[in-house]
Amino acid sequence: MLNNLQKRLSSSLDPIGWGPAVASVAGRAAKNPRALAEATTEYANRLAHIPAAAARVWNAEEPNPPVAVDPKDRRFAEAAWRENPAYFSLLQSYLATREYVDDLTDAGAGDTLSDGKARQLTNLLFDAVAPSNFVFNPGVLTRALDTGGASLWRGARYAIDDLANRKGLPLKVDREAFTLGVNMAATPGKVVYRNDLIELIQYAPQTEQVHEIPILAAPPWINKYYILDLAPGRSLIEWAVQHGRTVFSISYRNPDESMQDITMDDYYRQGIASALDAVEEITGASRIEVLSICLGGAMAAMAAARMGALGDERISAFTILNTLLDYSEVGELSLLTDPATLDRVEYRMSRQGFLSGSEMAGSFDMIRAKDLVFNYWVSRWMKGEKPAAFDILAWNEDSTRMPAAMHSHYLRSLYGRNELAEKKYVLDGQALDLSNVTCDTYVVGAINDHIVPWTASYKAVDLLGGSVRYVLTSGGHVAGAVNPPSPKAWFEAVGAPGDPAQPELPHDPKAWHEQAVRTAGSWWEDWTAWSTARAGALVTPPAMGGAAHPPIAEAPGTYVLD
């Protein structure tokens, strides 16, 4: 009973394990008095130089601040932080104290995991108490003056509403501006297959002829599928349909407590395996291209490896976006997937049968709280600004739940033991070796991806058995995928996309980066050339649905609405 009570308190009060990590770092720091003394001396020196620097600000001279301010930090973009001596001193004191705590953490370094968690907590706390987060923020005061105080009144009302209805988290986006099937997930199509786990959507053709090889989109179940069909003009599925492809997409059911015992094998059998069978029946095609993203890419790679081992060659070409296949380098997520943290996650899931979408979203928000929490704390609660109508944020807010058994198994087997890359993972009775994926593969990484570092996604080059084209694109984990042609878009690659014989790529991602050529434009265009070269002849579009799989609903279906 005492053990269960401890688990419950740990799971609810400190789900990430920050407390033990800070205690561990503090204990090591206490045994390093020299480093503590040096850090304290340096801190005192920084503070001592602030008054003189502020005086230079007053005299319009170059201040030579004791602590450099990151020019990309938008929190301190107003001129007052640079030109007003009082604001300048406040900011410098904050930055000096932050560096002091960083130095103290360095003094207690000695274990990568506890060091990372301690630094994560201190970063979170300092982001929370940043001087930009308070009402004396010059941007807040300027807006209050411009609006005659109305912005402060609106912000207070917004804060009360968020405290009452959103557990104290500020609203980020105007979801009412978007309606599924109208201006999100809006590419015309029909649901042509449904089981207890997925709906399969077939999209209506938009060209007189299509290439004979269809595309099956395999999205992650950790989010709603329509990241690949976000909005007109920003939908990769729409883009593919408009470029002469017959496209299908899986849409996963949002799990509830009745699905707590569903496994990864179930996600394979009732998910991508069932979808491939339905696509084959509807189109008559014996070859199918798979387009996948994130966790959907991992599942698609598992399916392709299993099929390859059994001689099933239906997957003719394979695209994976921002996907981990080797989990030895997972970036910031390593702090959320250590054994002790997974114990706490499993305990929470065991009590309700799933991991709620809000818990999942909250964990990701904490990783980048400066941008995903406190940014809206200021804009909404203090400046009284209405949330923007931003499609990516609206999709991100439409969170999903994770079934207990499958999610625990996934985290332990892949993040915990890296079984897929180590050739130890077993899917539906078959040990997987990714070298059995012998079709051509197009792999995309994003330069600013904090969920799947691009150097980690590059490891697919050595794991997969076929020819691989690796492309590095602008943006992050989501914006790197939602990347339609625009003046700001760019990508890097080696060789030409339409060349059937792609050049052999080096093992080291840095060596690849030295060879890669940057091109202005979207990787969507590059991918289209690569995919079209492997898409077969032009034919008349297939009918919507087949004899065994007639249309049963309009896209985007029903599962996505839960």
Image: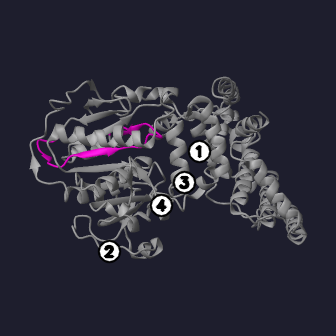
Q: CA distance from mark 4 to mark 3?
A: 9 Å
Q: Are marks 2 and 4 in contact (CB under 8 Å)?
A: no
- State the residue position of label 3: 415
The answer to whether 107 is drawn above or below residue 534 in the figure is: below
Q: Earlier in the sequence, mark 1 or mark 2?
A: 1
Residue placed under numbered mark 4 in the picture: 326
Along the viewing direction, whichever of 449 and 47 lies nearer the viewer: 449
Left or right of 221: which side holds 328? Answer: right
Distance from label 2 to label 4 (Cα)? 20 Å
**Residue holding disc 2:** 504
Q: Is disc 3 in contact with disc 1, using a CB cutoff of under 8 Å?
A: no
Q: Report crowding for label 1: few under 14, some 14 to 19, many 20 or more residues within 10 A (C-alpha).
A: some
| Horizontal and vertical percent position of residue 438 | 28, 62
Whether label 2 touches label 3, CB < 8 Å: no
Q: Which residues are magenta?
A: 207-232
User: Which residue sits furthest front?
Assistant: 429
> Marks 2 and 3, Cα distance to the nearest angstrom?
28 Å
Residue type at the position of mark 4: Asp
Give SS at disc 2: loop
Q: Residue at x 44, y 40 (%)?
A: 221
